[in-house]
Amino acid sequence: MPSLPIEDRIALQDLIAAYSWALDTGDVDGLVACFTPDARMVEEVFDDPDIWEGHEGIRGIAEHYRNAPGFPGRQHHVTQVQYTAQADGSCKMRGFAFVTECEGEPPYLLRFAGWYDDHAVKGDDGQWRFHRRTVRLWDGEVLKNFPGRGEWVPRKRPESLIIRR
């Protein structure tokens, strides 16, 4: 595999930060700008995984969360990202994801623990964007090396996060 220049690694970190800030501040256009026009985002969290395609789909998920009553105050934290440069110049990434809910007085809640499975590409303008982004719970195949683990257990979606299309 080719190596990933440090400038690209930093630019990919900036992409991840831009995504989180846009999502958590309700910046719909900012979130759309993080994705390629033919992007695909998948939420494999609940018993009914959601798939969002293209800028229209990304705009739909951004609008949904911006208007979901249980969402404001959440913060997405992505850490310990691994970057794997691909022969075609793209980059695959995976990193831990935590979502906190900062509403009311501390202590604040940990709402989600999982991971992102990403594929980013660099555009003709030199900017990195997500081409594929999948968010998963910290269960299923990622735990397959532990005896008795490795099966995904779907969770019921909370009423406040039901996506209406």
Image: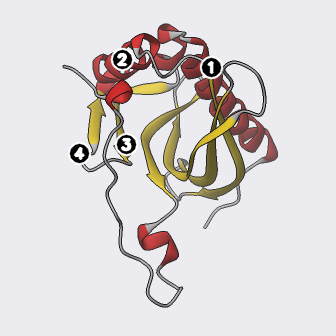
Q: Mark 3 points at which residue?
A: 43
- Label 1 – label 2 distance at C-alpha: 15 Å
Please, what secondary structure does the residue beneath circle 4 have? loop
Q: Name the residue under label 1.
A: 73
Q: Quadrant of the C terminus?
A: top left
- Label 1 – label 3 distance at C-alpha: 20 Å
- Check disc 1: other Cα within 10 Å, few if <14, some if 14-19, many if 20+: few
- Check disc 4: other Cα within 10 Å, few if <14, some if 14-19, many if 20+: few
Marks 1/2 in contact by CB < 8 Å: the verdict is no
Q: Please give the name of the residue rendered at 49% of the width and 91% of the height, measured from the top-left corner.
A: 147
Q: Which amino acid does label 3 sit on?
A: Glu
Give x and y (percent) for residue 124.
52, 25
Sequence-first disc among 1 and 2: 2
Task: Say the numbered circle drawn on residue 64.
Answer: 2
Q: Please give the name of the residue rendered at 55% of the width and 13% of the height, measured from the top-left corner.
A: 30
- Relative height, residue 69 to residue 75 (above, below): above
Sequence-first disc among 4 and 1: 4
- Relative height, residue 105 to residue 46 (above, below): above
Note whether residue 102 is visible: yes
Q: Mark 4 points at which residue?
A: 48
- Relative height, residue 9 to residue 141 (above, below): above
The quadrant where residue 68 appears = top left
- Check disc 2: other Cα within 10 Å, few if <14, some if 14-19, many if 20+: some
Q: Which amino acid does label 1 sit on?
A: Gly
Left/right placement of residue 77 relative to residue 56 reads right
Sequence-first disc among 4 and 2: 4
Q: Please give the name of the residue rendered at 44% of the width and 15% of the height, measured from the top-left corner.
A: 69
- Label 3 – label 4 distance at C-alpha: 9 Å
Q: What residue type is labelled 2?
A: His
- Nearest the eye: 51 or 113: 113
Give x and y (percent) for residue 16.
64, 34
